[in-house]
Image (cartoon, rainbow, N blue to C red):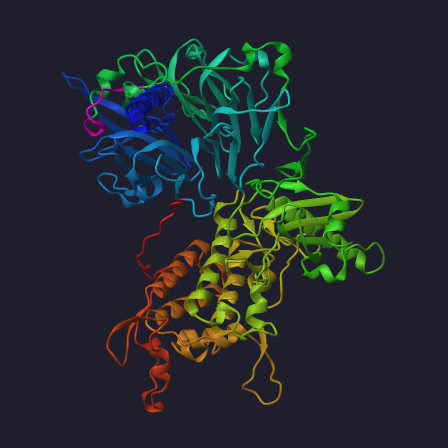
Amino acid sequence: MLMSRRPGLATSTTRLLVVIAFLLAVAAAAAPPSPRQFSTVAISHTRNSTLVCALIIDRVNEDGGGNSKLQCKSMPDGRLTSYPSADIPFNAIAAGKDFLCGLMAPVGGHAAMRWWSFTEEEEARRSRPVGRRIYWGPSLRSMSAGGPHVCGLSDDHDPTCWEWPGLDLPKGLDFSLIALGQDFLCGIVKGDDTAMRCYGGAMPSTPQFTADGVDVTFQTVAAGRRHACAVDKLGGLVCWGDGNPTVRLDELPADMMAMALGRNTTCILAGNGTVRCWGVKVPEEYTHTTFVSIEADGDTVCAVMTSNYSVVCWGNDGRFDGRHLVYNNTMPGACAPKSNCSCNIVPDSGRLCGTGGGLGGEELAVCSPCKQPLNASRKSEKKAHATVRLGESSSRRLCRDGDVEIMVMPARERSASQPARPLGCEEFTLKDLSRLTNAFAEEAKIGSGSFGSVYRAKLPDGREVAIKRAERASTGARRRRRFDAERAFRSELRLLSRVNHRNLVSLLGFCEERGERILVFEFMPHGALHDHLHGEDAGSGHSPLFSSWEARLRVALDAARGVEYLHCYAVPPIIHRDIKPSNILLDDDWTAKVSDFGLSLVSGASASASPTTTSGTAGTVGYMDPEYYRLQELTERSDVYSFGVVLLELVTGRKAIHRDQSQEGSGSPRNVIEFAVPAVEAGNIDKILDSRVPAPRGHEVEAVARVAKIGAECVRPRGRGRPVMSEVVAELEWAVTLCEECVVRSASGGRNSSSRNGGSDMSRSRSRSESEDRSPYHTREFSFGFGRVAGVGHARSYSTM
């Protein structure tokens, strides 16, 4: 009986599988493809000109398809430059501060991207631009540029960014769309929630949105220099940041197809093809013209006309006055398989794109952007309900300090499974912080900072934090110290709330209540670098900083990257003013992070200081730049000097100020510079190395020599003779690479073995007789890329994957 039922069961199962397969196929066909985000027009600015770049239609073949060429026109002089693409044409372009990127058409599921620096190409004076390839990999489905950065999305990996060493993105991000500003990235997360996430350090924290008390999901996002705008699925347009427009609801069109943002400029491509702008006026002759696409950067807006695909531009700087037409015949957009177009197709674009040989021969076209409703099309009572949500109470509090606007989020209870916000600082209550530290008990105290005591605590969600509490004093000589603590509190809150880098200690929140000034930071389990080098237990064996030179150089590289971010990528740049081992902390993975911004200043804000002002010289004896102290002029090179002292401490193991043990008795105080620099210049580096670390071997010898030389360069008396932090980072990266590739030949077996297991070149050199006293440091010539010396060639990759 059982056997007689099996055929029927098999038949039913087969039918069920067929039905399931059919339903899945229908669902797959109905599901909209991942949105594509590309442009064929891009804008960049140099000191004296605005560059408008576009893919120009060169010719159209009789059987469909054609050739396009990438050109940039400098305005207002009209100088034209072409950028060759070899055999594979460009399909999309992007541009930012002093650069242009061209993304080639995909071939076999892969695509390449080339990068040109306008300044480098001009200085090279070549017959034609050369550039360099920065990407070859899976085809991208989205590309966005902002400031000096460019990022792309593909279906195979996390967001990838180039020329952005300071960006630290969490693993596993899956965005459907991205938008880049000057130094921040915003993206819409794939999935049912389609949430918004922003990363970077040049704008306020990621806002959260509600409509009628329900979390809002998003359809599109765009970014300008310091602000961003997003449209939710209910048609709500929300903008945030510095430079966001003031828009009346009756000024909005009923629907839109695209947005373009600049410095203080926001433009919308309406559903009927016309353009509306805030912050820049649309020329009268184009107010009723229809366009296919728009782009903006700075105060410049460019748009592709629907009628003939010409590019016209306008702006506030006068460079387009009287000559708005820039190109006559451009590609109206990036070519894609017609099956990817979820809405309309740009008219006649199929003739321009032809058939994609690298896409399985499928017919190509330019997809029209889909129309999205805006607030103007909704009932008036619904318009006010799309609001920025900051905390459960939906209250908004803006703290202004100069030109910096900090968006504050009141603290909320979160489960351990909920991720911390990517950016932003929470406002804690004094009651909660007092409870977490047992009323700031002495047993919870772990140290002191630039303005008070530091306590260790654990938040309800399980995160360990360091709580810095400003010293309270109102009378006597301590009043001045209280004033300094207040200033340090303001400085750290103002600066750290807008920076985000893996080598900077993260500010999680603050408390400003009943005269208290408290900051909450991430906790660093392994403490300060100073304790590992000079503490009571230094050299006891528990620290990896005494097991290999590679570990020390990695700490130096981490800290250098943090300082480099402050100097080169923070907007505006930040000068720390107190770089020293006690302000370099180590997390649970031994990653070094720069901390304590109580003395920091924005570069340019206080370039010169006098002792009578609150921005007078500041720092720590032994680390303070003598030129800064003498001339009262602060520059980034002052931080370079301090970091050079730290490098010499890492190499020698000596404190910045220590006693000369070569003298009888206790010895006189001596600066580590006096101890180390003469030996470095004489090539006797082995005489000053920290003996608590195993002697360098193989390529470690060269690596350590490089770091010692870099330290000596950093502490040059004149600031202009010192390297910048980007050069220091480049050399430290190369030194760490040498350690990683360190291979020596075993003295006994003649086999190649890792430096961690092999013998020591240094120890062998030390065992020689005094008559043979030749250090391995004498056997090589080193060049460090500073000044007139040629740099060491090595590649640097900034992919964030």
Q: Is residue 356 left or right of residue 576?
A: left
Residue 765: image quadrant is bottom left
- Rendering coords of residue 299 (x, y %): 47, 27
- Rendering coords of residue 61 (x, y %): 15, 19
Most foreground residue, 478 or 322? 478
Residue 400: image quadrant is top right
Task: Tell me the quarter of the image containing the N terminus.
Answer: top left
- Specify the segment rendered in magenta: 357-366
Determine whether 333 is above or below 169 in the image.
Answer: above
Q: Residue at x 76, y 50 (%)?
A: 434
Most foreground residue, 260 or 354? 354
Confirm whether the magenta stretch covers residue 89. Answer: no
Q: In the current view of this chain or complex, which residue is farthest to the front? A: 1
The count of marks equals: 0
Q: Is residue 162 visible?
A: yes
Most foreground residue, 147 or 188? 188
Most foreground residue, 349 or 656? 349
Determine whether 339 is above or below 722 in the image.
Answer: above
- Rendering coords of residue 201 (x, y %): 53, 42
Determine whether 431 is above or below 177 in the image.
Answer: below
Q: Is residue 324 visible?
A: no
Q: Residue at x 30, y 37 (%)?
A: 138
Task: Tell me the quarter of the image containing the C terminus.
Answer: top left
Residue 250: image quadrant is top right
Determine whether 483 is above or below 147 in the image.
Answer: below
Q: Is residue 1 left or right of residue 237?
A: left
